[in-house]
Image: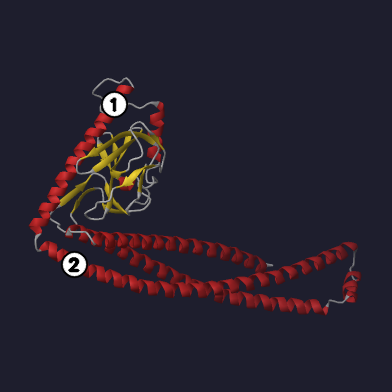
Amino acid sequence: MNSLKHLIVISIFFVAYVTSAQQNQEQLEQERKSLQAKIASITKLNAKSKEKEKSLLDQVNALSRQVRVLNRLVKLTNRQANYINRKIKENTVEIENLTTELSDLKEDYAKMIQKSYKSKSSQNRVMFLLSSESFLQAYKRISYMQQYTKFRKKQGALIETKTEQLKKLNVQLLEQRKQKEKLVAENRKTKKSLENDRLEQQKLIAQINSDQATYAKQIRAQQKKAKAIDRKIEKLIKEAIARANKKAGVKKGTKTFTLTAESKKLATNFTSNRGKLPWPVLKGDVIKPFGRQRHPVLKNIEINNSGVDIETEENQVARAIFDGEVSTVQAIKGAGKLVQIRHGNFITTYYNIDQISVKEGDKVRTKQAIGKVHTNSNTGRSIIKFSIYQGSKFLNPQKWIYKMK
């Protein structure tokens, strides 16, 4: 009976082990496919904009993004291959253990069958019962015979189960080896692409470094323009606060939104979704992250971004990231058209928008279309600038939007 209990424990462990391994493999594979899709999107955007692109800085930035993602893909694929390799080793050991266990089980079962065969005749069973010294002993012998028969059937069923487990494990092992070979082959191609992109990146950086003064001047001009736009956005937000407070009958000079019970609930819901909010476009790539950072090429220059710049494909829809009310729709010189949506005491800003489909005062729902991302006719690029504002400061969208890196 101990061998039976031991076998049941092993069977339970086997099922849990296989389930856990499948989940881990699925997670890694899902992440790998996501990176591959991102690389395909970046490559497509780069190829399209390269036909018209004049700025070496933009070219090297785009290439740098591609290099970063390719590098992540190489590391992830190595992790996945190593993970599968570990599972192959574990499965090999498990197969050996199962084979030994199955052999022992069959041997025990064969002995049991031989013993049963010797006493299988009806005459022997009757004599076994008639030789009992008492009725109680005869009853116990009948119970023993029944239990013995049940145990033999269980042993037979467990042999079948264990044999099936062994077959499945062998099939899984073969599949894992095929997966590993495929991953290794794909990783060679990825490394080759990464090497080519790095060489091209180095050439572009060398060109930029040969005339640092000119490019530094361009970057400072871009930063100056960005600051001017930020000041305009801050002014629009202050005006939106003033309008909302006036409507609520609050005295002038209040610098934050006066929240009603409804808007307070909305702000609470917005906060509770931090890190889970949807992207302002269905698909895209962050080309300029939030905050202060060294320029990726000219390291002696510091740049700042009050939101995130997301490059997407042409004709992509811009959408609200959460329920709210449109507080501002306006054109800003140098930044295209802008839409601001209020979520309690939070405001999300979407600019460089065309074909705006909402107006001030409209109630919007999460993922509702508010317009289309503008495509620059000179560069062929479609870039939306997105920011989140609360109180008197800009927040980092990369901490609020789901998997924004």
Amino acid on which the number 1 mark rests in the picture:
Arg
Q: How is the image coloured?
A: secondary structure
Q: Give x and y (percent) for residue 163.
A: 63, 73
x 27%, y 40%: residue: 338
x 35%, y 31%: residue: 361
Left/right placement of residue 302 relative to residue 313 reads left
Q: Of helix, strand and loop, which one carries label 1? A: helix
Give the tally of numbered discs. Answer: 2
N-term mark: 1 or 2? 2
Location of the N terminus by quadrant is bottom right
Q: Give x and y (percent) for residue 167.
A: 60, 74
Q: Would you name the residue on which mark 1 appears?
A: 243
Amino acid on which the number 2 mark rests in the picture:
Gln
Q: Give x and y (percent) for residue 191.
A: 31, 71
**154 vs 198, nearest the viewer:** 198
Q: Quadrant of residue 111?
A: bottom right
| Looking at the image, residue 310 lies above or below residue 176 | above
**323 vs 101, nearest the viewer:** 323
Q: Neighbour class for label 1 at 10 Å: few (<14), some, many (≥20)? A: some
Left/right placement of residue 145 relative to residue 21 reads right
Q: Neighbour class for label 2 at 10 Å: few (<14), some, many (≥20)? A: few
Q: Quadrant of residue 329?
A: top left
Q: Would you name the residue on which mark 2 appears?
A: 202
Marking on residue 378: none
Q: Of helix, strand and loop, which one carries label 2? A: helix
Left/right placement of residue 152 relative to residue 342 reads right
Q: Are marks 1 and 2 in contact (CB under 8 Å)?
A: no
| Looking at the image, residue 165 lies above or below residue 69 | below
x 39%, y 74%: residue: 184
- Number of the front mark, 1 or 2: 1
Q: Quadrant of residue 4?
A: bottom right
